[in-house]
Amino acid sequence: MNQEKQPSPDLFLNAVMAYRDSAAVKGAVELDVFTGIAQGMNTAEDLAGHSGADKRGMRILCDYLCVMGLLEKSGTTYSLTADSAIFLDRNSPAYMGDVVNFLLDPFFIRDIGDVARAVRKGGVATSAEGSDVPGHPMWVTFARSMTGMNRMPAGLLADVVCADLADSDAGGQVKVLDIAAGSGIFGIALAEKHPQAEIAAVDWPNVLEVALENAQEAGVGQRYSTIPGSAFEVETGTGYQVILLCNFLHHFDAATCSKFLARMKDALAADGKIYTLEFVPNEDRISPPFVAGFDLHMLRQTPAGDTYTAAEYEEIFAAAGLEMTACTPLAGTAYTVVVAGHK
């Protein structure tokens, strides 16, 4: 006989206390727990000595990380899960632990408890202290912290662009405009995979310093130039075969996106393409979970930012005089690549 599922407050209570998970992960990254375990320091005593922490405190933290599913435990010995070994060991090429420096920065989460206010207003107001202020230092933190998280999608996006360039038989120099370049990882990945790609990165001057450092470290500094200033205002030049718009349009309302894209249309070569990397929810706007949930993030962090469905992006590009030619999920990531060009 089928038994009806009994009502439970667990979902509600876990959501209300989710801050524990954030705090535990941030603490573990700061104490180098995951890297320590990867290096063979797999007891609370060993890890405490490694990080200069209290043994009991370390045991409690590691046990909680086991509860979360980020560590495993046998007796008094801890080990990494497959996920934590790939993404949280500092020596892994896919390491992304540094994202805690941005996503859990006090400035970034200061409005987390004010969702009701954001819902009443339909967003948050800009201010002299907001992240929209030109050259805000928060974006330097973003650039330095998010490189690891974006390394894999940057490489996959570069593969998409390179395949399109090969199909178009583009020869010689390939002019690439990288809007709101941040760490520069998306343009850099393309430059690494396409020897003729010449990157022009747009962002605030202090952020571009980080991008230049990364380009030089990657060995593509000679093909990497910068255009400091607002993407809405600076003179970018024209004739770009590739324009990268990664994690940018979701900060703005649809009309602003279309207005900006019309500006990008003028910078685009006749056969050029705009590659937009975004979180694109399904038409129901509640799936997939991580992508759909990003909408609330925009509500409480921007005046009018939003996530847009594929159909909405088609309308946004059309309003700018552009034609959307592809809207394809980027395998193994939460991102979708939206490709558009001249009609």
Image (tube, rainbow, N blue to C red):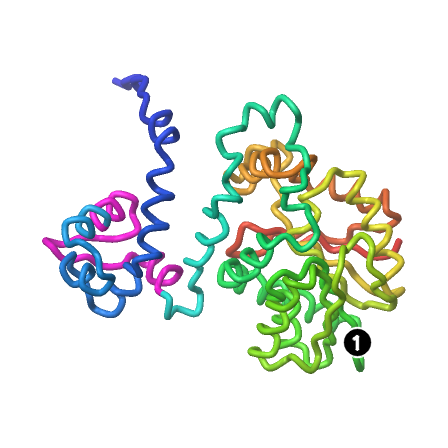
Magenta residues (range): 62-89
Q: Can you give x and y, in whole percent of width and height, for residue 202 in the image?
A: 73, 62
Q: Quadrant of residue 300?
A: top right
The stretch drawn in magenta includes residue 234: no
Residue 34's place in the image compared with 128, above or below, is: below
The residue located at (35%, 64%) in the rendering is 89
Q: Is residue 252 above or below residue 122?
A: below
| 129 to 221, vertically: above or below | above
Q: Is residue 164 left or right of residue 206?
A: right
Vertical relation: 329 (above or below) 130: below
Residue at x 39% of width, y 68% of height: 92
Q: Residue furthest front?
A: 128
> Label 1: how many residues lie within 10 Å, few (<14), some (14-19) or many (20+)?
few
Q: Is residue 67 magenta?
A: yes
When asked about the image quadrant of residue 253, the answer is top right
Choose between 74 and 339: the one closer to the eye.
74
Question: Residue 218, percent across and down?
Answer: 57, 78
Q: Secondary structure at mark 1?
A: loop
What residue is drawn where x is 86% and y is 50%?
262
Q: Position of residue 162 (x, y in %)?
A: 68, 71
Which image quadrant: the N terminus?
top left
Image coordinates for residue 106, horizontal then vertical, percent: 48, 44
Under mark 1, the amino acid is: Asp
**Left or right: residue 174 compared with residue 247:** right
For disc 1, the marked residue is 169
Whether residue 123 sits left or right of residue 33 in the image: it is right
